[in-house]
Image: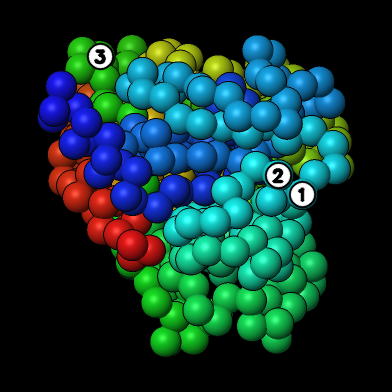
């Protein structure tokens, strides 16, 4: 009894962590950022400190998330860990002070930066909310050169406003790896205060299997958001010129409808080779990867890439760009890094892979699961995230 009271007093002494994010569970269509945040919460000891402020909708949806109470605090059970966090699902116009304790210390943690309601607006208003407010910002790969090349003018204006306004002068930055730390310092100067804490993914599958790879055939799968950054159009363009033993199934919610129309037109040209299957619940992703020989994601930039990791974690090799942390794939027989500006190279590589038999392909399944396991076993996530949030204490 006394031990429980002591833990409660310790929790009460620590500042509340307010996490601002556009989408959160049970929303799932935004993909990796939602999964990252679920896993981040799961590794923290005192989840009652966590208060998440998010939208009452899923990505591109107009219907309120099922089972949530809007504009008030909900106690939400996290999938996987079973831990509980406090979540405010916002609907309509609102003031941040309505769901944030006006007095007392607190940490504001921003999950992403290109958001008006869940980054810029609360960042501007934090000065009059009272109390001690420490600011932590995680760009989630949004500052990568490749990511900034998508809608570059709009993003450059946004970043320039941040710098000129000095809104991020005294903040701390959460980088998920050394490359993201370099991106932060490139944009906001070498004096930007950063701490590295890695993305926390799912556990690799315990009982994995080899794919039934056939000669002159290659069953590919794309599982990701459908948006320009993820490069689906480039994948479809490549598919028009590969041999007919190569097929592609596509899973993922449509984030950019204008971009999807371009993809859909290309899909209509190669119906016999590529099929759109709709979106997937996160719990289905690893099992879906296992049904294919390999995955493909010609992304323009990832700070982590949950879709890439989950393919490895299901013992399926990946073809992807060099704009991810997952490099040297061919050398480690975990997949293939390709130059996305060279479609000819990609087509040649895919045709080459399709010629492999099951015995030749097996080492790539082994390399993929080994890559995921090595990453997961060396995380030290709880320690690093305790350090991250102690910055504001």
Q: In this view, does 149 lie to the left or right of 62?
A: left
The residue indicated by pointer 3 is 209
In the picture, which quadrant includes the C terminus?
A: bottom left
Q: In this view, does 271 lie to the left or right of 190?
A: right
Residue 350 seen in this snapshot = no
In the picture, which quadrant includes the N terminus?
A: top left
Can you tell which of label 2 and label 3 is closer to the viewer? 2
At mark 3, the secondary structure is loop
User: Residue at horizontal 64%, vertical 76%?
Assistant: 167
The answer to which quarter of the image holds residue 145 is bottom right
If you read the primary sequence from the N terminus, does the residue marked by circle 1 or circle 3 appear first? 1
* Circle on res. 98: 2
Q: Which of 258 and 156 is in front in this view?
A: 156
User: Residue at horizontal 71%, vertical 55%?
Assistant: 115
* Circle on res. 95: 1
User: Residue at horizontal 56%, vertical 66%?
Assistant: 143
The answer to which quarter of the image holds residue 65 is top right
Residue 217 x/y as whole percent: 46, 21
Residue 173 x/y as whole percent: 44, 67
The answer for how far apart the CA atoms under marks 2 and 3 are is: 51 Å
The answer for how far apart the CA atoms under marks 1 and 2 are is: 6 Å
User: Residue at horizontal 49%, vertical 86%?
Assistant: 189
Q: Which of 180 and 66 is in front in this view?
A: 66
């Amino acid at each position: 009894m006394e031990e429980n009271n002591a833990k409660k007093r310790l929790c009460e002494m620590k500042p509340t962590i307010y996490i601002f994010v556009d989408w959160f569970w049970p929303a799932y269509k935004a993909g990796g950022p939602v999964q990252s945040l679920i896993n981040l919460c799961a590794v923290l000891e005192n989840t009652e400190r966590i208060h998440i402020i998010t939208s009452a909708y899923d990505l591109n949806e107009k219907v309120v998330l099922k089972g949530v109470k809007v504009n008030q605090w909900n106690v939400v059970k996290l999938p996987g860990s079973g831990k509980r966090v406090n979540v405010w699902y916002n609907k309509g116009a609102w003031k941040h002070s309505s769901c944030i304790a006006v007095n007392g210390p607190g940490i504001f943690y921003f999950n992403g930066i290109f958001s008006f309601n869940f980054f810029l607006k609360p960042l501007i208003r934090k000065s009059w909310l009272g109390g001690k407010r420490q600011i932590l910002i995680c760009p989630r790969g949004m500052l990568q050169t490749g990511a900034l090349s998508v809608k570059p003018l709009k993003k450059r204006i946004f970043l320039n406003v941040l710098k000129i306004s000095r809104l991020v002068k005294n903040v701390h930055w959460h980088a998920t790896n050394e490359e993201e730390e370099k991106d932060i310092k490139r944009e906001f100067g070498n004096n930007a205060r950063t701490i590295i804490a890695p993305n926390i993914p799912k556990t690799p599958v315990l009982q994995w299997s080899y794919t039934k790879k056939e000669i002159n055939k290659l069953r590919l799968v794309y599982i990701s958001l459908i948006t320009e950054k993820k490069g689906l159009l480039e994948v479809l363009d490549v598919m028009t010129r590969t041999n007919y033993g190569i097929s592609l199934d596509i899973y993922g919610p449509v984030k950019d409808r204008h971009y999807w129309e371009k993809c859909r037109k290309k899909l209509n040209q190669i119906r016999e080779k590529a099929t759109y299957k709709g979106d997937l619940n996160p719990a289905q992703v690893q099992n879906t990867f296992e049904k294919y020989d390999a995955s493909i994601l010609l992304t323009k930039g990832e700070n982590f890439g949950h879709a890439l990791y989950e393919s490895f974690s299901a013992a399926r090799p990946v073809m992807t760009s060099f704009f991810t942390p997952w490099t040297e794939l061919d050398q480690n027989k975990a997949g293939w890094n390709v130059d996305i500006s060279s479609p000819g190279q990609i087509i040649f590589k895919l045709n080459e892979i399709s010629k492999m038999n099951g015995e030749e392909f097996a080492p790539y399944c082994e390399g993929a699961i080994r890559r995921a396991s090595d990453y997961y076993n060396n995380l030290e996530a709880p320690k690093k995230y305790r350090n991250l949030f102690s910055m504001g204490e």
